[in-house]
Image (cartoon, helix red, strand yellow):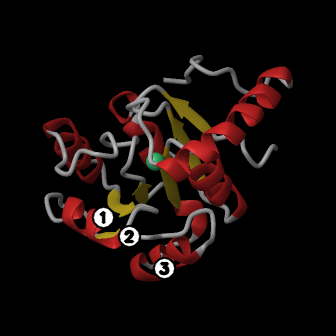
Amino acid sequence: MNIFAPDYYVQSFKTLNIRKLHEMGIQLLLCDIDNTLVAYDEEVPSQDVVDFIHKLKMNGIEVALCSNSPSSRGKNFGKHLPVSKTYPFSCKPFPFCFKKAMKDHGLKASQIAILGDQMYTDILGGNIWGLYTILTAPIAIKDRNITKVFRFFEELIYGYLEKKKILKRGEFDD
Ligand SMILES: [Mg+2]
């Protein structure tokens, strides 16, 4: 398997099949924030995000936030949501937040899924450390400057995955 290829590719968190995760034995969903749940300059979760997290919890899946953005951003966003933990400044794809999430929740990597919009952070990190990886199309075209750099390299990966017929941008599983 290619380390940049997600296990599951969705158009949005709103189209994610929660039952499928539940049936696979996933007990924790680690959610990226910027461009996964909201645009990076939106400070408060939308009602759709609140509903999504409630729905996960109703299906027996705990939710934690893990964001590479500065700590105040992650913490402030998490305050509005019924999440078990918020891991700000999480340095994905490095494993700090994944290991902390396993320890905090008493779970193995195979019981955790990560949902994010970036191949170089969310998907690469999740794949390397054995989580179930879910790639979503980014919510907005706008990005932080650092993310713009990653997006450039991401274009190359999309090209490679499309050539190998592993993943085609816009052809979602759900
Ligand atoms: Mg993101």
Q: Could you say where residue 83 lies in the image, as x and y percent from the top left?
A: 25, 63
* Mark 3 nearby-residue class (10 Å; few <14, some 14–19, many ≥20): few
Residue at x-position 58% and y-position 48%: 133
- The residue wearing badge 3 is 100
**Foreground residue, 24 or 157?**
157
Residue 88, label in figure: 2
Q: Dot 2: what SS?
A: loop
Task: Give the label, 2 or 3, closer to the camera.
Answer: 2
Q: Amino acid at mark 1?
A: Gly
Tell me which label, 1 or 3, sits earlier in the chain.
1
Are discs 2 and 3 less than 8 Å apart at CB? no
**Foreground residue, 140 or 55?**
140
Q: Could you say where residue 27 lies in the image, as x and y percent from the top left?
A: 42, 60
Q: Residue furthest top?
A: 171
Task: Using the numbered discs, state the Cα–Cα distance from disc 1 to disc 3 in whole angstroms.
Answer: 16 Å
**Foreground residue, 158 or 52?**
158
51 left or right of 133? Answer: left
Q: Does residue 87 appear anywhere in the picture?
A: no
Q: Amino acid at mark 3?
A: Lys
Q: Residue furthest right?
A: 164
Q: Is 116 rendered above or below residue 172?
A: below
Q: Could you say where residue 143 lies in the image, as x and y percent from the top left?
A: 44, 41
Are discs 1 and 2 less than 8 Å apart at CB? yes
